[in-house]
């Protein structure tokens, strides 16, 4: 098995031999390709990424399944302003019950940050807070610069603790899963109108056609695991599953070849 990490793939042609066309024009030929692109990337690009295009049922599964954006915001402080027994700082807005929409107005994206957790032990992490934000508000956060996010988070902490002397963090680190063109989301999920059958269909290898070389294009990644979608271990297990498919294929071929009768 050969792994290529660069350059990026722009087109995958099948059936055999499978040809992976790269951004720099190089064409990589293979008997089998395991596609681990995220569901977000497949939603965006599957129509142009595969030639021929994906079967209708697989394309429909991609369309029906959901993927959302969840980001983390890490704030590092020179000294802790929280007490040693503090594990989390929770935010509760009194006027949330009056919202007519599930999403906040664009300028109030920060209200989707529900808390900051204290990372322990400080010997390992330093004086670090970890916040979560999800949904459309996470995408709006990603469009802001670090300075703006740091200022807003500092004001939130001052407002909810009542401590106006909280300094700005000396460093901020945050994820941007939604706007990353090679990820386009954080976690897949079975949204209304989809089911586990769509997950199974997404994971089904190509081509479907009998009497052709099997398992030319395989699919792995967290969105393809029927039970553990949206998890890292689901992604790992899905990759192992596809590798085992190929192992079993060649073991069967080897046994068939070695047990042929001599004529």
Image (cartoon, helix red, strand yellow):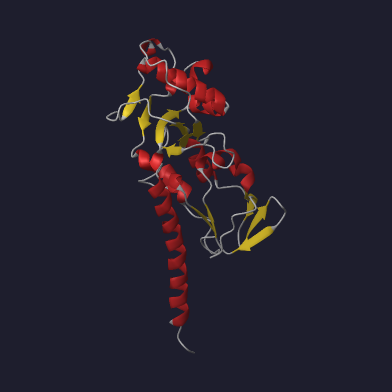
Query: Residue 91 or 97: which is nearer the viewer?
Result: 91
Query: Residue 58 or 26: which is nearer the viewer?
Result: 26
Give above or below for 241 relative to 165: below
Determine the residue positioned at 69% across, 50% down. 23
In the displayed image of the protein, which residue is found farthest to the right? 25
Give above or below for 87 relative to 230: above
Determine the residue positioned at 46% across, 35% down. 66
In the displayed image of the protein, which residue is found farthest to the bottom? 263
Determine the residue positioned at 46% across, 50% down. 203
Residue 202 seen from this side: yes
Residue 71 lies, in percent from the top left, at: 46, 33
Residue 15 lies, in percent from the top left, at: 60, 59
Query: Residue 149 or 113: which is nearer the viewer?
Result: 149
Determine the residue positioned at 60% across, 41% down. 45
In the displayed image of the protein, which residue is found farthest to the front? 79
Give above or below for 168 relative to 7: above
Residue 167 lies, in percent from the top left, at: 46, 22
Relative horizontal placement of residue 6, taking residue 162 as reference (left or right): right
Query: Residue 59 or 46: which is nearer the viewer?
Result: 46
Q: How many marks?
A: 0
Residue 102 seen from this side: no
Residue 254 lies, in percent from the top left, at: 46, 76
Relative horizontal placement of residue 182, taking residue 220 as reference (left or right): right
């Amino acid at each position: 098995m050969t792994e290529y990490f660069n350059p990026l793939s722009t087109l995958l042609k099948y059936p055999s031999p499978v040809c992976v066309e790269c951004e720099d024009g190089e064409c990589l030929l293979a008997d089998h390709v395991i596609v681990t692109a995220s569901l977000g990337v497949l939603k965006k690009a599957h129509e142009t990424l595969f030639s021929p295009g994906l079967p209708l049922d697989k394309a429909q599964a991609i369309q029906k399944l959901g993927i959302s954006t969840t980001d983390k915001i890490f704030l590092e402080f020179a000294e802790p302003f929280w007490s040693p027994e503090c594990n989390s700082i929770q935010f509760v807005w009194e006027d949330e019950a009056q919202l007519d929409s599930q999403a906040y107005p664009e300028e109030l994206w920060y209200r989707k940050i529900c808390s900051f957790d204290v990372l322990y032990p400080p010997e390992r992490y330093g004086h670090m807070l970890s916040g979560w934000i999800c949904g459309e508000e996470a995408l709006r956060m990603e469009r802001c610069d670090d300075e703006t996010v740091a200022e807003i988070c500092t004001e939130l902490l001052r407002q909810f603790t009542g401590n106006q002397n909280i300094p700005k963090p000396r460093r901020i680190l945050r994820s941007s899963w939604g706007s990353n063109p090679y990820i386009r989301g954080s976690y897949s999920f079975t949204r209304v109108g989809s089911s586990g059958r769509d997950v199974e269909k997404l994971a089904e290898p190509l081509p479907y056609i009998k009497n052709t070389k099997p398992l030319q294009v395989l699919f792995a990644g967290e969105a393809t695991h029927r039970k553990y979608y949206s998890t890292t271990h689901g992604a790992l297990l899905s990759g192992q599953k596809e590798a085992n498919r190929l192992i079993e294929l060649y073991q069967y071929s080897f046994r068939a070849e070695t047990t042929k009768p001599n004529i």
